Each structure stands twice: as structure tokens, then as C-alpha cells.
Amino acid sequence: MNFETLLDALIRDTTGKSLFLFAPELTVCGTIVVLLLCRLINLDRLVRPVTIALVGGLIGLGFAASEYYNLVHGPQTSEKLFTGLLVFDQFTVFFRLFLLTFIIFVTALTAISGIPDYEDGPDFYTLLFGATLGMLLMASANNLLILFLGVEMASVPSYAMVGFLKGRRQSSEASLKFVVYGAGAAGVMLYGISLLAGLLGTANFTEMAVNLDQVVGTAGMKDPVVRTILLGALMVFVGLAFKLSIVPFHFWCPDAFEGAAAEVAGYLSVASKAAAFALLIRFCHILVGAHVEGLAQLNYALGLGLGLVAALTATFGNLAAYSQRNVKRLLAYSTIAHAGYMLMAVAAMMVIANGPKVPNVDVSFNVTRSIEGLLYYLVVYMFMNLGAFAVVALIRNEIYSEDVDDYNGLAQQCPRYCLCMAVCMFSLIGLPPFGGFFAKWSIFAPLLQAGYVNKMMWGVLVIGGVNTVFSLFYYIRVLKAMYIAPRPAGARTAGELGPAGAFAIVLTLPVLLTGIGVTPVLRLTETAAASVFETTPRTQVARLAAEKPVDEPPSKL
Amino acid sequence: MTSAMLLSAIIFLPTVGALIIALGFNKRDEEPMRIFALAITVATFILTIFLFKDFRYDVAGIQPVTDGGVGVKIPWIGNWHIFYQLGYDGISLPLVLLTSFICMLAMLASWSITKQVKGYLVLFLILETGMLGVFLALDFFLFYVFWEVMLLPMYFLIGIWGGPRKEYAAIKFFLYTLVGGVLMLIAILMFYFGSPINTFDIIELSRIGQGLVPKAAFSPTVQITAFILLFIGFAIKVPTFPFHTWLPDAHVEAPTPISMILAGILLKMGGYGILRIAFPICPYGAQYAAYALVVIGAGSIIYGAFAAMAQTDFKRLVAYSSVSHMGYVILGIAVWKISEAGGAAVGKDYWLMGMNGAMFQMLAHGISSAGMFFMVGVIYDRVHHRDLNQFGGLMGLMPLYSALAVGIFFAGLGLPGLCGFIGEIFVVLSSWNFSPLVSIIAASGVILTAGYILWAIQRVYLGAEYKGPHREGIVPINGREAAIGFTLLAFAILLGVYPNFMLDVMHSSMSQLVTQLDAGYQHALHAAGSTQALLDR
């Protein structure tokens, strides 16, 4: 193979396939360029930056939707883009739809709440779309390089967005904390990546899984190579745990959210978590290796460890939220707790996939269910968490405060905002008929199944249940202030703007709808979950082995 | 109208009404809104009466019996085998009627609410949907959804319109019920994954629990664990002795109409859950715990009566009387005596009598306690206090009210000829078969009940003159209040004089339940025994 054929193949791969399937990301890039160019030639006087951002987001979402349509109605393939740097499957498309829908809602929210003023608009939306681009890459990463690039592309604009309210000291402080933490986590992760790539001789996820089997082979934990690989993997987990704000890497979260504008906090709390979970699931699947029995022991232990961390995170988040006076800080701890719940699904997945086989617990079914539960949770979480932050932002515009005590008696003056807050919070607690209930349900169910594999997971389940009761206290405190406490005399009179109230309701309605009409969303998450499981090296090898009983090294995947 | 439509209409008509009130009415049009809400509850009540049209007294199982099968079953969440499944039988029909009936009267009593009327009416109607849904749902998942749906409106109804300690009472109610709900959720998951086809169908799960489905029975361990989880969940709602502490607070702080609903309907959900879910699905677990249940039931009767006697707050007295009266329900359900040898029920007819008594007691208590709370509310609206030692002489000042109140309190006391008597006597008689000692304890509860109720009547209605504040506020009851009182008293008399009116409805379902439980327990026992024998060998 000479250079020319190689180049030829590259061009064919790029222009013939990859660029088309990369259209949503390209649209996001294009939007950024248009935003900056418009400012350069003063076109932003004519077209509002937020309009450009909204149009860009909508076009991107349109591309993603057409990809989804093609996948559903065409052959369900998994493609590798850009010579294997990215992977394109239902899972990718799901996250494209998810993130682009989300960014449209965030943009609309900023348009209504007016947090970047006219001057700052292009800057803000550039940062917003830039971060989203990074998250989109995270969701489709198939290479350690993209993993790192994606995480950093998502993080760096986030640092700037947290400090976007330039005049506030608190904002700058929050931003600085976030940067320092982020830089530390990125350094650790990069070191882990270099260890993994160095030992396995490749950075491509699929090849890594294959090589992992060969390198580890039958060597036990005493082997220094195995230990180093484990160390590398743990370091990558640290980087992801930082994005997920998992205990003990959560310290940045409350400060950053308190300092940032509520819109930014709402964006970060959902989007970066979703992308990080997508990446975590992909990364977990390479660690499993390509052979069915290869690394089970190691991953089993890892799954149990994740379960423990998840239980800790949920408990810590809920207990710490209890004493908060600032609503954003309270919601920050609540997002930590929810990251814990969602991590339980990943833990259940790892335990079921790698633990000893138990009758009545079908592995592929339950692994798919775990991922499905996580994705469903993310969909509901997007609406309920952004809804809560949106109401915080809208109320801030009325009363210039984000303290729980200042919310006293607001229900009389802002009935719509308060109703939306109530719905979002009941959903966050996990009460039917809101989406949060089915979301929690679909995570607890695989967890119960995982308990048959290892009893510790039942402990995690019980902790999850107990946490639901804990969380009642602080969510209800906000609602109590709004609905039950009287408005103090002399407090600032708050009103509601028509469009803002309507927007809050539009944002909250899906919280109710996902709880009643579960099936449509379930169909979406189900195919995405199935595809990620189908395309793991391990499943493919298992299928090859089932078709051809000859034991050949799985070199071509 | 098909049965599917009828059942759905019963459940969702109040929600539709709530939506119309929320969107279609101006906040200031209080009077039209109240009348509209009342019309909705009346319409719901009428719809529930239509349930009798297709009701067949001879059929023990789930109704309506249609050509396509039993009840209504529409897929809801297909992947999880969750169905929108509704139906009723002799156990749920009386409770559905009670629900819509008490809701109608409570709505009529809601004219005393003057703060934020719109919000109140919306929440009230959503609450009614939740309650009716619980009694009609046959899919465990759906049941749970309705069960929790009740929580939200109830929290706000107590929290916003309640008395001085409303915040505390509301959060306490919420917390207790949520804990019970989480326990129930774990049991649901156990059943779901334990059943061969992963179902939530309560009827199917009962058949599995009773060993009627080949090669798929819940093991004794599962049954015992699940029963304990479920029982705690339901016992919180009933409430029985160790789990009752939310009740006095919630009942006392809630506004009068909501107290009526709490006592009249919400408490019945616990009993209904035990009859519909905990016992049928876990007969082995139920029998395993029968003795404990009897102790809890009898303990609640005595404890509640003594606690009621010690109160000086009129409403708190009525609240504790609920604990006492609901103890009869637990006792009546649990008097399941088995022979040591084969596991067959001894004196099955007595047990059936206890079951019927428990069920009847729920209805009777629904009427009498709602009435008692209403009567307390009427006087509270006038004098703004509830201190038993500062009443007296009301008989002279408000003769009609006093007569109605005394009649309803006598119904609560269990005077022969009134509704409270039938349930109590059935339970006391049937418990003799289980253990004479329990019977004597339960019977002495009747005396204690008479003690605190007569003493209360003496302190409030009799006496020479009224001793408390706000003497000027005491005016005779108006027509609306009198109508509520008369209706409740009339039904208390009707059920007391002609109990077959309801006993006929529940009879075949109850006797089938008893037979099934007996067989189910023996099946589980023998299955466990043979396993044990294998292990011993």
C-alpha cells in the first residue's frame, strides 16, 4: 500500500462518508463562524445573535433527526468516521438529538431571561456552541485522543461561561475554582490516557479492547502491566468523574453553580453530565475487552466500586443539599445526587455484564435495560433540571435574589413559575405521574437484578430508595417557601411576563408527558441502548464465535 | 357507554373538572367555581352508581365481565408489560362508592374554605382522581402511580389550608406515606422479577402467589419479605399502632373537608391494599404474620381508645378514635387460624365473618368518622377553638346540630341499629374463634369507645351553659351543613338497619378470597415442606 492509495482511501472516507454523517457537528461549527463573522462586519446590528444561534441549533437538530430517521428506516449500521476516530451509531444519534434539543432550549431561555446582553451575545453563544461541540464529540468518541479533546473542548468554554457575569466577584471566583479543578482533572486524565495508549499500543477504542485481552491475557493483578493499565483506567475515570461531579470530585460543582448565572448552571448540570455519561458507557465497554471471559474479574470489581461511589454520591449530595439557603447551590447538590443515581445504572450494567452468571438474569437484556434506564433518566433530567434552573433565572429577574427565604409566598404573585418549579421538583424527587418516577424506576429495576449477581447491589438499591426520602426534605423546603409561607410585608412585588411564563410551561410540560406517555421516549432510548451494546467489541466477538466455532484471534473488527 | 369508558370517566372526570377550573375560571368567580366543582363531584358519584348496572352479584372475580375478558386492559408501557388495567369486584365497589360519596359531601362542606379557592378546588379534584384510581386499578404499577398521585394534592391541601401547625403536619404526612411507598415499590420490583412473564397484573400475581400457576410460585422467603414490606406500607396508611403518629397531626391540622376525606377514604386505602394486594399475593407471608397482625389490630383498638380518652382537643379525640376503629379492620382480616397439622384454616366461616366485618367496618367508619370530623368542623367554624373543656350546653343553643352530631357520634360508638355496630360485632365474634382472649380485648375496646364518646358528648353538647369564648358566634347550622349531616346520618342508619345492602355486594368476592387464601397457604406450605424434606434427606 503506497502513500497514494492511502491518501485516496482517506479522501474517500472523509468526503464520501464521514463528512455527511458529521453534519450536525459541522452545523454547530458553522453557527460559531457565522456568529463571529456577523460581529466582524457589524451584521449583528441587523440580526440578533440569539436568532442566529437558534437557527443554527435548529438546522443541526434537523440533520440529527434525519440521521435518526435514516437509521430507523434503513439498515442499522454502526459506522466509523474519520478513519475510526469517531463512531456513528444509534447511541451517537441519540446524544446528538439530545444535546441539540437541549441547546435550543437553553438558547431560548437566554433569549427570554436576557443573561447575555446584546453586546455579549455572540461571545456567549460562541462559548455555548463550542462547549456543545465538545460534548457532541464526547458522545461519539472512539479514540482516546477524541476523548481528551472532547472533554477539554467541553470544559474550556464552560470555564468562561461560569465567569461570564464579569462584574461579579463571585462569578470570577467560581470560574477560577472551576479552572483549577478542571486543569487538575485534565492533567490526571491525560496521564492516564498516555499510560493506556502506551501499554496497549493504540488509542483506538476497538483495537484497545482487542489488545487489552492480549496484554492482560492470563496475567493476574500481580503483573505490573496489569496494574499500570488499571491505574490508567482509574485516571481516566477521575477525569470523567470530575465532569460528572461524582464524590469525591464534586467540590467545584456547588461553587461554580452558585457563581454562574442560573442559565449557565442549568446548561452545565445537564449537558456536560449527559456527554460524560455517554463517554463513560463507551469507555466501560472497551475495558470489558473483546473476549467474553477476558477481564471479567477486573471489571466486576470495577462495577462494584462504581456502585459504592454512586451510593456515596447520592447520599452526600442529598445530605449536603439539606442545609443550603441559596437555591442554585441547593440545586447543585441535587445534581450531584442525581449523578449518583445515574451512576447506579452504569454500576448495574458492569456488575451484570461481568459478574458470575446467575439464572433468571439475562445479561444482554439487563445490560441494555441499564443503559436504557440511564438514557431515559437523562431525557427526563434534561427537562426537569433545566426547568428548575429556568424558573430560578426567571424569578431572579423579578426579585433579584436566589435565596430560598426570598421565595416566600411567591406562589401568589408568580403562579406559573411556581407551578413549574413544583412539577420539576416533584419529578426530581421521583414521584408519579411525573417523568422522574419512571426514570428512577428504570434505574432501580436493573439494580435489583444486579443484586442477584452480588448482594451489595441490593444495598445500593436500598440506599437509593432511602435517598429518595432524604431528598424530599430540601425540595419541599423550596416549595414550602413558595406556597405555604406568606409573602413578607415590604417584599419586592414580583410579576410574570407572558412569554416567560409560557416558556416555563413549555419546558415543564415534557416532565409530565414523559411520565404519562412513556413509550415514545422509551423507543428512542431502547434502540440507542441496544446499539451501544450491539457494537461493543465483546458482543461482536461473541457473535462471531457463535457463528464460527473456530477460535481465531479477533483482529479485524 | 362501554365499561372501559365508564371506568376511565369515573377516574378522570375530576381531573377534567380540575383542568377546566384551572384554565376556564377567573380567580374571583368563587361561587360559580364552587358550584361547578360540586357538580363534577356529583356527576362522578352518579357515574359510580352506574357501576351497579353491570355488577353481577354472583360473580366473585373481577368485573365488568365483558366478551373480551375481565375488566379493562390496555397496554400502557409495552416494553415493561405495564397495562392500563381497571376493574372492580365486591371488595372495591363499595369503596369506590364510598369515595365518590364522601368526596361529594366534602365538596359541599368546602364552602367554609375562603382562601385561594381556585387552587383548593383544583387540588381537591385531582385528589379525587387519585383515590378513585387506587380503588379501580388492577395493575400494580398503575396502582402505585395513583397511590402516589394522591400525595401531592394532599400535601398542599394540608399545608396551605391547614391549621397553625400545618407545615409540620403536611411534611409528616408526606414523609410517612413516601416511606411506605418506597417499601411498596421494592415489593413491586420483587414480584415483577419473580413472576415468570414479568407482570404487574395484580390478579395474575395473586394466582402466582397462591400457587395456581404451574412452576411459578413465590417462595416462602419472598412471600414473607414482600408481605412485611407491603404491610408496613399499608399499615402506615391505615394507620395501625406503631405507624400511626402522622395521623393525629394531619387530621387535626387539615381543614374540615380534608379531614373528612382523610378519615373517610384515605385510611381505607390501607385496608384495601391489604385485602387486594398483600394478602392475595402473599398468603404464606400473611399467615406467617397473622398472629402479629392480630396483636397489632387488638393493640390499636385499645391504644387508640385510651389515647382518645386522654385528649382535650375535640378533633384529636376523633383522630385517635380512627386509630381505634381501624384496629378492628386489621383484626378482622387477620383472624386466620390454621390447624397445626395440615395448614387448613380452622373455622373458615368465622374468618370470612371477620373479613366481612373488616370490610363493613371500613365503610361504616368512612361514614361515621367523616361525619364526626364534619361535626367538629361546624362548631370550630363558629367558636374557633376545639377545647373539650370549654364547650357545654350546645344542645340548647344549636338543637338541630346537636341532634345530628349525637346521632353520628353514636354511629361511631357502635350503637346497635347504626352502622358502627355491624362491623365491630362481626369482628369481635369472629375473633373468639382465633383466641378468646383477643375477643375479650376487642370487646373491651367497645366499652372504652363508649366511654370516650359519651364523655365527649357530655362535655360538648350537654351541660347547663356554654363556657368557652366566642359565645356570640354560635348560630344554628345552615341548610347546607344540615344537608350534609342528614345525609351522613341517614346512611349511618341505613347501613345499621339493613347491612345486607353492602354485605350482599361484597359477599361472593370475600368468600372467594377466603377460599383462595386458604388453598394458597396450604399450597405454599406443602411446597415448602417438600423442599424442606428434600433438604432434610
Image: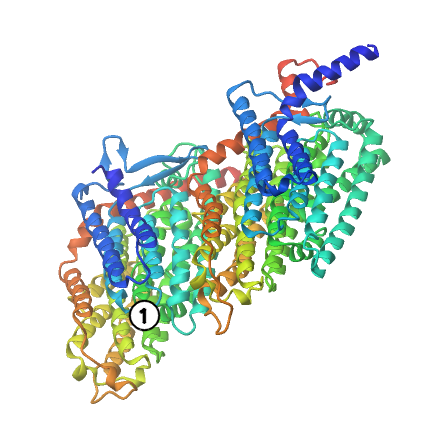
Query: Is A179 situated above or below B263?
Result: above
- Looking at the picture, how far across and down is residue B403, in whole percent? 16, 75
Q: Looking at the rendering, in which quadrant would you find the N terminus of chain B? A: top left
Number of disc labels = 1
Label 1 marks which chain's residue? B
Query: Quadrant location of residue A545?
Result: top right
- Looking at the picture, how far across and down is residue B506, in whole percent? 22, 49
Residue A43 left/right relative to B107:
right
Residue B138 left/right relative to A121:
left
Q: Amino acid at mark 1?
A: Ser
Q: Is residue A446 visible?
A: yes
Return the residue nearer the eye: A9 or A320: A9
Query: Quadrant location of residue A222?
Result: top right
Return the residue nearer the eye: B166 or B228: B166
- Looking at the picture, how far across and down is residue B496, in whole percent? 16, 63
Query: Quadrant location of residue A31?
Result: top right
Measuring 39% from the left and 57% from the top, which residue is drawn there? B153
- Looking at the picture, how far across and down is residue B341, in whole percent? 37, 48
Return the residue nearer the eye: B78 or A365: B78
- How crowded is the residue under tag 1: few (<14 C-alpha within 10 Å), some, or many (20+)? many
Per the image, the residue denoted by label 1 is B321
Q: Is residue A246 visible?
A: no
**Colour scheme used in the picture?**
rainbow
Return the residue nearer the eye: B302 or A410: A410
Measuring 41% from the left and 48% from the top, which residue is drawn there? B144
SS of the residue at dot 1? helix
Query: Is A236 situated above or below B310?
Result: above
